[in-house]
């Protein structure tokens, strides 16, 4: 694939030439590549169909996202050079957030103890939900939303509402959600 910059002959060219090669515009660059071949008779695997459906959903989300002027502006701010707000929204849909760490050092038993969750996304984490449950029974003792830390924007703080006389045998699970609704979880055992 060839990249051409600052050539007046092909600057802004788009489309195919004789079904042999195709001009594409990507940011400020014009790219020349081999004409893609599509054979509708070729059988698609279940995995290919799943990926195709996922990209269709991502494209629908991205089209909707750029229809909102505020959201389009936010996606464009986050986009790398040569990327559009649409590209960023498409990427955001396809990439789930990551819960990197659950810090339970300050979770010492009394109500008001804090659990700090480190969650990150390529665009924005919109919510983090924390659940505390017993290991042996699976009984949920407490569940609620964490609050975004005012200074460290990748940290979410959950404040417990119950007293825990013993911290042995508890599972703390944090689930992060991003703008398109993708979720990722991490659990630690006390």
Image (tube, rainbow, N blue to C red):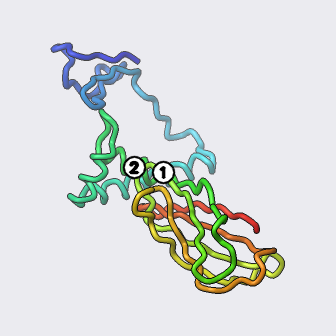
Give residue 27's quadrant in the image: top left
- The x, y position of residue 172, in whole percent, is 68, 70
**Mark 2–mark 1 distance (CA, rounded to whole Å):** 6 Å
**In the rendered image of this protein, does residue 187 appear above or below residue 36?**
below
| Residue at (57, 80) in percent of width and height | 112
Question: Circle 2 is placed at which residue position?
Answer: 90
- The x, y position of residue 124, in whole percent, is 41, 56
Hey, which residue is sitting farthest left in the picture? 8
Q: Nearer the viewer, residue 44 or 187?
A: 187
Relative side of 74 to 150, left or right: left
Number of residues whose C-alpha sits closer than 10 Å to that of mark 2, classed few (under 14), some (14–19) or many (20 or more): many
Check residue 94 in the rendering and tell me which mark sits there, or answer none. 1
| Residue at (63, 46) in percent of width and height | 45
Q: Nearer the viewer, residue 64 or 84?
A: 84
- The x, y position of residue 170, in whole percent, is 75, 74
**In the rendered image of this protein, does residue 136 appear above or below residue 24?**
below
Relative side of 61 to 186, left or right: left
CB atoms at circles 2 and 1 under 8 Å apart? yes
């Amino acid at each position: 694939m060839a990249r051409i910059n600052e050539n007046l002959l092909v600057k802004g060219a788009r489309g195919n030439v004789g079904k042999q090669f195709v001009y594409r515009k990507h940011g400020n660059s014009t790219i020349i590549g081999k004409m893609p071949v599509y054979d509708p008779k070729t059988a698609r695997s279940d995995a290919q169909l799943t990926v195709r459906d996922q990209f269709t959903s991502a494209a629908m989300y991205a089209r909707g996202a750029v229809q909102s002027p505020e959201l389009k502006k936010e996606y464009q701010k986050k986009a790398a050079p040569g990327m559009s707000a649409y590209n960023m929204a498409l990427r955001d849909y396809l990439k789930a957030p990551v819960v990197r760490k659950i810090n339970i050092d300050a979770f010492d038993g009394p109500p008001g103890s804090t659990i700090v969750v480190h969650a990150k996304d390529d665009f924005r984490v919109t919510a983090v939900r924390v659940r505390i449950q017993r290991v042996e029974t699976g009984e949920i003792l407490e569940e609620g939303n964490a609050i975004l830390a005012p200074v460290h924007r990748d940290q979410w703080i959950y404040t417990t509402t119950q007293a825990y006389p013993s911290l042995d045998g508890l599972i703390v699970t944090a689930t992060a959600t991003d703008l398109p609704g993708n979720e990722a979880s991490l659990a630690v055992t006390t």
